[in-house]
Image: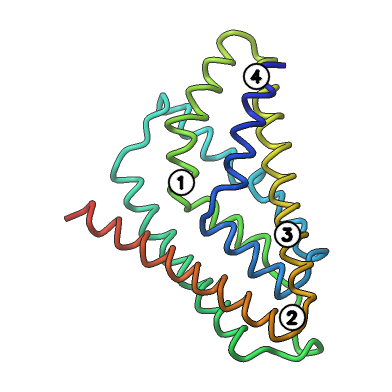
Amino acid sequence: MRLFLEGALLGLYAALSPGPFQAYLLAQSIRNGAARTLPVALVPLTSDPPVIAVVLAALAQVPAGLLRALQVVGGAIVLWLAVTTLQGALRPEPPEARVPPRGFLRAALLNFTNPNAWIFWSAIGGPALATAWRARPADAFAFLAGFYVLLTTGNASFILLAGGAGRLGPRFQRALALVSGAALLGFGIWQVGKAARGAG
């Protein structure tokens, strides 16, 4: 139970921490509605396992060069999503012209290249998971269960709140889309700039 609660607290922290993934959830909720965006709340279940596997295989140490590469690639992806979000806000399409959303794959790519996920599993989640596994594999599964129950629940709650806010009218919906696009733009510029400073 202790490991489950420990994982749950970390999952809640991850869900509440502002970042490009949360900005993307906001943008998708506003554009496509909460019901169509809810599956994106499960993205960490698909994008995190490779991160965890690499971190544990490397004994919870992620090389600085890999982090810089992820910052560049991830920053470029965030900037691309920012441009598409801002374009959608400035030139909204009529409902009949919209194509089915590809939010899940984009979110998985965004989350996998997010250096914050690699840093978290390298510095906090990975060591805790490895310690729990050495003590008893069931403890490791309890830790992961607590983490992902709170993380996905927090993501889903955020999507529902954002989707509800998006129903306040087209003007408010456009303003929220502009805010989420600007947030993505800021995260992308910061991420690429941080990688450039680290390489200099």
Mark 2, other Cα within 10 Å: few <14 / some 14–19 / many ≥20: few
Mark 1 to mark 2 CA distance (whole Å): 31 Å
Residue under label 2, please give it.
99
Circle 2 sits in a helix, a strand or a loop, which is it?
A: loop
Q: Which of disc 1 and disc 4 is earlier in sequence?
A: 4
Mark 4 to mark 1 CA distance (whole Å): 22 Å
Q: Do tag 3 and tag 2 residues touch (Cβ < 8 Å)?
A: no
The x, y position of residue 110, in whole percent, is 54, 58
Q: Amino acid at mark 2?
A: Val
Q: Residue at x 55, y 81 (%)?
A: 86
Q: Do tag 4 and tag 3 residues touch (Cβ < 8 Å)?
A: no
Mark 1 to mark 3 CA distance (whole Å): 21 Å
Mark 3, other Cα within 10 Å: few <14 / some 14–19 / many ≥20: many
The x, y position of residue 12, in whole percent, is 64, 39
Mark 3 to mark 2 CA distance (whole Å): 20 Å
Q: Residue at x 75, y 63 (%)?
A: 37
Question: For the view shown, which residue lies furthest in the left direction?
Answer: 200
Q: Which of disc 2 and disc 1 is earlier in sequence?
A: 2
Q: Which of disc 3 and disc 1 is earlier in sequence?
A: 1
Q: Amino acid at mark 3?
A: Ile
Q: Amino acid at mark 4?
A: Leu
Q: Nearer the viewer, mark 4 or mark 2?
A: 4
Quadrant location, the N terminus = top right
Circle 1 sits in a helix, a strand or a loop, which is it?
A: helix
The front one of 15 and 101 is: 15
Circle 3 sits in a helix, a strand or a loop, which is it?
A: helix
Mark 4 to mark 3 CA distance (whole Å): 27 Å
Residue under label 4, please give it.
3
Q: Which of disc 3 and disc 4 is earlier in sequence?
A: 4
Residue under label 1, please give it.
116
Quadrant of res 93: bottom right
